[in-house]
Image: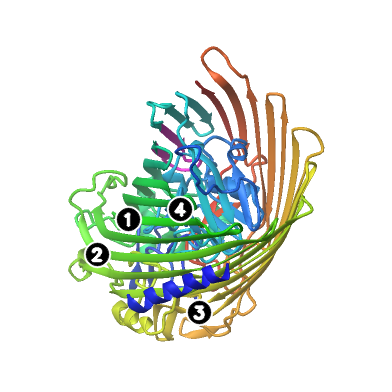
Amino acid sequence: MGRYLLSGVALIGLLISSAHAETTDHNGHKTHPHRSTHANHTRTTTPTRRAPAPRKHTEVKSGSESMTVHVRRRGSHSAVEVVSRETMDHFVAGTSPMQILALTTPGANFASDDAFGLDTVANTLYVRGFNQTQLGVSLDGIPMGGQGFHNWNGLGVDQMEIQENITSLTMSQGAGALDTPSAQTLGGAITFTSSDPSDKAGGQISQLFGSYNGFRTYGRVDSGKLNSSGTKFYAAYARTDQDLWKGYGDQQEQQANFKLVQPVGDRGKITAVFDYSNFAQYNYLGLTKNMWRKMGRNTTYLKPNYELAKQYAYYAQNGGVPAGLESVLSNDEIGDYAYDGTQTQRNYLSAITGEFRLFPNVTSKTIAYAHVSNGDYSATNPFLTSPTSQVPMAMETGHPDVRRLGFVQNFDIHAGHNNDIKTGIWYENDRFNYPMMMYEDGVNTPHSSIADFKNGTTWWSDSFNTNTFQFYLQDTYQIIPGMTVEAGFRSLLQTTHGGTSVDNTSSLSEWGVYYSHPASGNLTAANAFLPHFNFDYHFLNQHEVYFDIAENMRAYDYSAQSSSGSPWSGLGSASNPAQTVFDENKKSLRPERTWNYVVGYRFNSHFFSGSADFYHTDYYNRLAAITSGSTGNTYSSFMNVGRETMNGADVAGTLRPLPGLAITNSFSWNDATYEDSHLPYNGGYVSIKGKRQVYYPKFMYKADVSYTWHHATFNFNTTYTSARQMTYTNDEQIPAYWTSNLNVAYDFGTLGFAKNLKTSFGISNLYNQNYIGGVYGAASVSGDDNANLFVAAPREFFGTVAAQF
C-alpha cells in the first residue's frame, strides 16, 4: 500500500510544482435584513430571510453482470451510518430525508417549522456540531454543495430528488469522505443514492391528504427494458401543497425526475438524469424568544391586515410601539414584523454519467453535470418608503440566478490481492448573480410578493464567479481478513472573483434607502494536502472497532451584500466603506480548518445491535462577521475569531426480542466550546472562552419502536433535545423540548391490477408540543436580540394511499 500512496503523493507534488460578535450563518449565510444601526444611519437589508425587519449589527453538501463497479455497503459500518429505503417508508410520504436522518441517527439534529421538513429557511440540520453548510453532500456522485437557504453553490436534497426515488442515504459521521466532491466539508458527508429504472415495465402512485389542506400526489412510470441492449428509463412527478399552519398563504412544491440507463455491452453503462423543481411558498415569520412567549406560537406576518402593517412600519421608522404593546414588545421587535415574505425557487439539474471497466482491474466513473437555479425572494421592508404613495414601506425582491457547470472523474484500481486504490478529480464553475429590486406599495393595496416583477427599481446588484478544483487519492489495504486500513489525501483549490457590480444607493434617496455595503475583489482558498486515515477491524463475526482521522478545509463563502457571514457581505458602514474593510480583511483571512478524530465500536447479532462512538474536533480559523472599530465608529467586519474545541459521544442500541419488532434507543452528548477570550465587540472586547457553541444541543435522546406483523407496520419515535444556546455569551437559551411521531400502515397486497396496495396514517408532533424548531440567522453576542427563531408545526394528521402496477 505504501508505495502506491507514496507514488500518488509524488505525482500530485509534480503536478503542483508544474502546473462569528456577529457570526457566520448557521444555516447558510446569516442575514440581518432591514435592521438599522442608528448610530451611523446605516441599515443592512435583504428579503432573503423570513424576518425582513432590521437587526442591530450584533449577529455575529449496469450494465452487464461481468462489470466490476464499486457498490457502497448497505449496512452501517466504520464511522458510516446508512438509512435504507425501508426506514424512509416508516415516515409520512414526502418527509424530508434530512428529517428522517436526524430521527434515526445518533448525533444528528434536525428542526424546522413545517411537518414535512421542507421549509428551506427554517430547516436546521446539525451532525455532531456541524451544520448543513459544513457537510459534504452528493447525489449519485453529483456535488450538491451547501444545503442551507440561498444555496448559491448547490442544491438542497428536497429540491433535487423526489423522496420516493431515493433508495438510501449514507452519513459519514467521522471526518468526511475523500471522494465526496465538496468545498464546504468541515465535518461529515452525506451521500444520496437514487433508484435505477426497473427492468420490468410498471409504475407506482400515491396520494396523501393531511391537516391544513395538505395534499401530495406522487406518480412514477418505469419503461422496463425497451430493447436487447437493455435501455430503460423512468419518469416521476410529485406535487406537495399545504396551507400555512398559521397566517396567510401556502407552501407548494412541484418536482419531476427523469432517469435513463443505457448498458454498453459488457463494458459498463451510461446514465442520464434530468431533475426539475419549483418551490413557491409564503413564509413564516422569524421571532425573538420574547415575541414567541408574549405573542404566542401563532404570531407571524401581518398579511392580510394591510392597515396594521402600515401602522407597524410607521412605529418602526419613528420609534415607539402601538397602543397595548407597551412593556410587551420593543421598538426593534415592532420592526421585526412586516406585511409578508415569500420565496420562489426554480431548479434544473442535468447530468450524464459513464461507468466503464477500462481494464480487468480498473473501473472509471465520469460525471458531467449542469445546474441552473433562479428565483424571487421577496419581503416587505418597513424601513423603506414607496416614493409615489409615501407608504412607509416597500417590497424588495432579490432575483438570484445560479449557473453551475462541472465534471467528476473517478478511477477505482484493484492493485494486488489486498489493495484497492481510488483517485479522482472534480472541477466546477459557479456563476452567481443577485440583483436587488424595489417595488412600490400602494396607498390601499400592497405590491404582490409572488408575481409582477416588471418595472422594478434596481437598488444594487452583485455578481460572483467561482472556480473549484479537487484531487483525491486513497489507498485501502486489507492487512488480514476483516482488518483494513485506508490512507489518503485530497487537494482543494477554490478562487472566487466578484462582489458588487451595481450600486444605485446615492440616486435613490426618495426610497429612503441606506448604506448597502458594496465591496468587490477576489479570494483564494487552497490546501494541497488534506489527509484522511481510517482503520476498521471486524473480528469474532459480530464485533467491529474503528477509528477515523482527517484534516478538512472549507473554502470561503460568498453571498449577496445584504447578508452577513461571508468576506464580501454586510461589511463596513457609511463612515467606513465596505471596500476598505474588505481590502483590510483580505490581508489576514485564512480558510476555516478542522482536525476530526473518531473512535468507535459496533456489535451486531440477530437479537441486538449496538454502537458507541467518541469524537474530538479542533476547529481553527473560525470565521465570523463581527462588530469592530472604536466605540464612536463601529462597523461590520469579517475575520478570524479564534478556535473551537469539541468533544462528544454517541451510544445506540437496537433490541429485536420478537420477529418484526425492533426497539432502538440512542443517547448523544456534545461539549463544544469556544476558545476566544478577546473577541471584538461594539468597540470593545468580550471573552467567550469556555462558552458553548450556539444552536447545537448538549444532549439528545432518541427512541424508536417499529413492529411489523403480517401486513401491518407500526412505528413510534420520540426525541428529546436539550437547551440550545442562543448567544455567544450563553446568556439566552432556546428551551429544551420533546417531540414524537406515530405512523401505522397496512399492505393489502394485490387487488385487481394494483400491487402492494398500501394505506398509511401518520401523526407528527403527536403531543402538540409548543417549541422552537428551526433557526435561521446570526446569533447575538448577548441578549434576545435576533428574530431568527421558528416555531415548530403543531400536531398534524396525514393519510396516504399508495399502489404499484
Front position among marks 4 and 3? 3
| Residue matched to label 2 | 460
Which SS does the magenta portion mostly show? Answer: strand
Q: Is tag 4's residue or tag 3's residue first in the polypeptide sequence?
A: 4
Q: Label for residue 426?
A: none
| Residue matched to label 3 | 641
Task: Give the residue type that dot 3 points to.
Answer: Val
| Residue matched to label 1 | 404
Q: Is residue 257 magenta?
A: yes
**Could you tell whether 370 is left or right of 138 in the image?**
left
Measured as percent of width and height from the top left, residue 666 is found at 72, 52
Measured as percent of width and height from the top left, residue 196 is found at 47, 36
Q: Could you tell me how far apart the alpha carbons at marks 2 and 1 are, in whole angstroms? A: 23 Å
Q: Is residue 366 magenta?
A: no
Judging from the image, what secondary structure is the residue with disc 4 in?
loop
Front position among marks 4 and 1? 1
Q: At x 39% / y 70%, what residue is drawn?
A: 493
Question: Which of the two residues, 731 or 269, is positioned nearer the viewer here?
Answer: 269
Task: Give the residue type that dot 2 points to.
Answer: Trp
Asked whether residue 555 appears in the rendered view, the answer is: no
| Residue matched to label 4 | 121
Q: Could you tell me how far apart the alpha carbons at marks 3 and 1 are, in whole angstroms? A: 31 Å
**Could you tell whether 80 is left or right of 222 in the image?**
right
Q: Is tag 4's residue or tag 1's residue first in the polypeptide sequence?
A: 4
Asked whether residue 410 appears in the rendered view, the answer is: yes
Q: Residues within 10 Å of mark 4 (few under 14, many from 20)?
A: many
Magenta-drawn segment? 236-258
Q: Residues within 10 Å of mark 1 (few under 14, many from 20)?
A: many
Q: Is tag 2's residue or tag 4's residue first in the polypeptide sequence?
A: 4
Q: Could you tell me how far apart the alpha carbons at marks 4 and 3 are, in whole angstroms? A: 26 Å
